[in-house]
Amino acid sequence: MEMLRDDEDGWRAAADLLAEGRIVGIPTDTIYGVAAPVAAPGVVARLFPLKDRELGKPLAVLVADLNQARELVEVSPLAEAVAARWWPGALTIVLPRTERFDVDLGGAGDTVGVRCPAHHRVVELCRRMGPLATTSANRSGRPTPAAAADVALALDGTEVAAVLDGGVLVASASTVVRVDGDEIEVLREGAVSARELAGVVAEADRFPRPEGTVAS
């Protein structure tokens, strides 16, 4: 497993590996993840056995911006308002998938969790490679390592081709929310709190928040 520096050359090398159908470990604004382009569905499927992940647990997708997200999901006005507040940032938004996006990401398959990270190199990688299917860089059920060397150790013997060394990452994982029409449900509370989400939704005059639609 190759260790790549967190510089222009390292990220270019990572993009080249992804273009070859390889899997790469990347630092984000939250934690380390392993990534594969959704344009290479055969590679995406290999993320599950790589970390012993159950097929019932869907993969999230990193995107460069809301326009790229629209290639995968149907973005409601409320979802757009929430994304405008927290993207780029640590908020994954689960939305109905579009009919034209048919890559199997696990789970029931009717929704996709999308996130635009606050990490300019990851965003540029998404612009170059397209949306990236990602999952945390750990064996399922184990903590996600905070350092690249520990990621390489945790995933030793897998088909991860390289890990970009972004230093020690100590941020919280992203908050995951499901947006269904004008209702929002917190599936996992992380860097963005349920209280913050409730406040933004309540402030959106077009979307008065029904009781109980935002919960921790």
Image (spheres, rainbow, N blue to C red):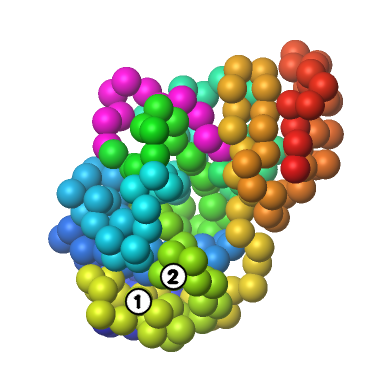
User: Marks 2 and 1, how far apart in space?
Assistant: 7 Å
Task: Identify the residue at horizontal 67%, vertical 28% (top origin).
Answer: 184
Query: 5 or 214, which is in the foreground?
Result: 214
Q: Magenta stretch: residue 96 in it? A: yes
Report whether residue 26 is seen. Answer: no
Circle number at residue 155: 1
The residue sitting at the top extreme is 206
User: What's drawn in magenta, residue-wise?
Assistant: 93-103
Name the amino acid type tagged 2.
Asn
- Quarter of the picture containing the N terminus is bottom left
Query: 92 or 138, which is in the foreground?
Result: 138
Name the amino acid type tagged 1.
Leu
Q: Quadrant of residue 139?
A: bottom left
Q: Secondary structure at mark 1?
A: loop
Q: Residues within 10 Å of mark 2 (few under 14, many from 20)?
A: many
Q: Quadrant of residue 58?
A: top left
**Quick check: 4 left or right of 86?**
left
Q: Which residue is mark 2?
A: 138
Q: Relative to residue 13, is residue 121 depicted above or below?
A: above
